[in-house]
Amino acid sequence: MKRRNLLASAAMGLMLASGAAFAESHAKTKACFVYVGPIGDGGWTFQHHDGAMQVQAAYGDKVEIQYQENVPEGADAERVLTQMALGGCNIIFTTSFGYMDPTNAVAAKFPDVMFEHATGFKREHPNVSTYNARFYEGRAVQGLIAGRMTKTNKIGYIASFPIPEVIMGINSYYLNAKKVNPAVELSVVWAFTWFDPAKEADSAKALIDQGVDVIAAHTDSTAPLAEAAKTEGVIGFGQASDMTEYKDGPRVSSIIDNWGPYYVKRVGALMDGTYAQADAWEGIAGGEVLIGEITDKVPAEVKAEAEAMRDAIAAGTYHPFTGPINKQDGSVWLADGATAPDGDLLGMGFYVEGIVGDIPQ
Amino acid sequence: MDFGGINPVILIATLMASAVPILLAALGEAVVERSGVLNLGVEGMMIMGALGGFVVAVETGSPLLGFVGGAVAGAVLSLCFALLTQVFLANQVATGLALTLFGLGLSSLGGQGYNGIKPPATGQLLPDFMADLPVVGPIVFGHDWVVYFSIAMTAVLWWVLKSTRIGLIIRAVGESHEAAHALGYKVNRIRLGCIAFGGAMAGMGGAYISLARVPQWVDGITTGAGWIALAIVVFASWKPWRVLIGAYLFGGITVLQLNVQVNGGLPSGILFLISLVCIVALLVLYLLRAGRTPQQSLNPLLVIALAFPPIVWAVAVLLGLRVIKLPVEYLSMAPYLITILVLVIMSAGRNSKANGAPACLGQNFHASR
C-alpha cells in the first residue's frame, strides 16, 4: 500500500510538474523564421522579417521571435531546422521554395512543432502547412504598365529559378503587357540565383544593352534598379519590397509582399488553440500582395488603368489568366473566357504562346 | 556579320569592368601565395572592403577616398590574419576560413543603416570626345580609373615579381623560407607586408563592387567573388598575366552568357570574333616559341582548346546557322567550366614544374627552428 501510494504521489507530482512546465512553455510561444538571404537585402527576406516583427508587435511579451539569416537551401537547412525544433520553437516558418524537402523531413521528426513552408506544395505531415501569395496578380499590373510604357517594345524579366512561381510571374507579366501592346517582345534572363547583386546587375545590363527599357526582376536585391538608374529612359519595378529609395529614379511601381497579417493570424491561432493545417494562397484581395505607389513617371491615364486592374483583381472580376490562352507550342490551355484553375498555376511548367525561348530544366 | 542583338564593343567594355573585382583580389592573393602564405579569407576581406569603401565614399562624398577606405578596411582585416598566422603561428587554412566568416559577419553588422543609400558615382576617367570614338572609345577610353588601375597593377606585379630585387625576395621566402632566413631576410615581416598588400587589393576589389558595379550596399554583396578569385590564382599558376586572362575569361563568359540568353542564342558573328581571338592567340604563341632555343612545341591540349571555337564556327557557317541555340543550364555553368578548363590546360604540359605552387605555401615559419 505504502509503496503504491508513493508511486501514485510521485506520478502525480510528475504530472503536475510537467503540466506546469507545459503551461510555462506555452505562456511564451516561440515563433522561428528561416531566411534564405540577409535581412538587409531590401527585398524578399526583408519583407519576411517585417512580418516577423509584426508578430512581435501584435503579441508583445507573449511571443519570442527567433530567426536565422542566409540559410542555404538543402542539407544545411535541415540542420538549422532541427536545431530550432530542439531549441523549443513552437512554430517554424521556412521562407523559401528550396526548403520544401528539408521542412517535410524535419517535420516528420518533430510532430509537436508546427512547420509553415512558403511557396511550396508538399504537406507530407499533419504539422506542415504551406502558404503563398498570388504574386502573379501583381505581375499582371506590372505587365500592363510595361506594355504601355515601353518605347522599344522590348520588355525584360530577370528570372531566378525555373519553378512554377517564377514561370507563373513571367506568363502573367507577358500576357498582360501583350493585351495592351500587341507588338511587345519579352526577353527572359535566368540568373540561377535568388540573391547575387553583381549578377543581377549584369543581367539587367545585358537586357538594357539589347534595347530592353522595362525590367521586372524576380530576384531579391535592389541591384537591377541600381543598374537601370544608370541609363536614361529605363524603368523597373520594386520586387518583394517597395524599394522606395529608387522612387525618384527608375522604380515606377512595385509588388510588396505583405506577410505580416498571415504570420499574426497563424501564431495567434497556435496560441489560442485553433491552429489547423492549412494551404493558404491569398492575393491582392487578401492584402498579402500590395501594389506599391505608381509614380508620376507613369502618365495619369496609364496609372488609372493599372489601378483599375488592381481593383478588378481584388474584387474578383478580373483574373490575370483569362482565356483564350495557348501554350507556347500552340496547343490550347484555356478556352475563351475560362480562368486558370489553381492546380494548373501551382504546377506551371510552360510558357504561354508568344514568349520566345525555352524554360531550363 | 550577324551579331544579333549583341553589340561586341559594349560586350568587351562590359567584361573589362565586370572582371575588375575578381582581378584585383586575385592579383593580391597571387602575391600573398607567392610569399608562401595561403590566405583563404579573400571573401571576408573583399566584403569588408566593399563596406569600408562604401561608408567612406558616402561620408566624404569622394569615390576616390572610398577606394582608399576599401583598401584600408581590407588591409586591416588581413592584419588580423597576419597577427594570428605570423606571430602566433596559427594554422593558415583554419585562420583564413575564420577570417571569411568574421568579415561577412562584421560587414553585416557595420552595414546596418547603409542600406538603400546611393554612393557618389565613379565616372569615366577620360574626356567624352575620346570615349565617344567608335569602337576604341568604349573599349579603350571609356572606363573609370579602377579598370586602368587593375590592368596597370597586372603589369607592375608581373614586372616586380619577375625582374626586381623585391620580387626575388618575395619568391625566395615563398620557395624556401629556411634559405631566405639563412640569407638574413626577415621572413615573417616580408610575409606580413605581402598579406597587408593582398588585403588592400581584395578590399579595393570589394569596393569596386559596392561603388561602381552594383553602386549600393546590401548585406553579402560579394556573394562568392572571393572564392572565384582564389580559384583563379591557383589555376593561373600564380602568374599575373594569367590571372588577368582568367579574370577576363570568367567575367567575359558571365557577361556573354547573359547576353546570349537575352538574344535567344549565340550569334555567329560573336562566335567569329571569338574564333579570331583564338587564332591570333595561336599565332602569337607559335611565334613566341619559334624564337626560342631549344625550340619547344606547343602544348597540344592548348592547341585543341584554341582551335575549338573556329571549328564550331566553320561548322555553323557550313550548316547556314546564324544563331546557335544553347540550353540555359549549360550557359550558366559555362563561366566556371571554361575558365577552369582553359587555365588547367595552360598550366599542364611540359614545364609544369615552373607552374607549380610555391614550395612553402601554407607553411608557417619561426626563426627558432
Image (cartoon, coloured by chain):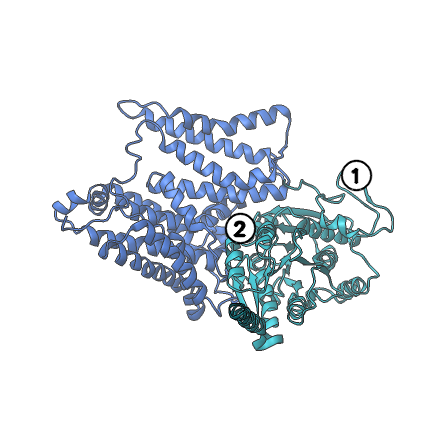
Chain colours: A cyan, B blue
Question: Measuring 34% from the left and 52% from the top, which residue is drawn there?
Answer: B96
| Residue denoted by label 1 | A330
Question: Measuring 70% from the left and 54% from the top, which residue is drawn there?
Answer: A151
Question: Measuring 67% from the left and 69% from the top, which residue is drawn there?
Answer: A273
| In-front residue for pair B18/B341 | B341
- Chain-order first, disc 2 or disc 1: 2
| In-front residue for pair B196/A3 | A3
Q: Residues within 10 Å of mark 2 (few under 14, many from 20)?
A: many
Q: In the displayed orientation, state which residue is furthest to the bottom.
A: A61
User: At label 2, which amino acid type do we have?
Assistant: Lys
Q: Position of residue A352 (x, y in %)?
A: 75, 45
Chain for disc number 1 = A
Q: Position of residue B21 (x, y in %)?
A: 43, 51
Q: Find residue A199 and name its label.
A: 2
- In three-dimensional space, the C-alpha distance between marks 2 and 1, rounded to whole angstroms, equals 33 Å
Q: Please identify the quadrant where the N terminus of chain B is shown.
A: top right
**Can residue A153 be spotted in the picture?**
no
Q: Position of residue A1 (x, y in %)?
A: 54, 69
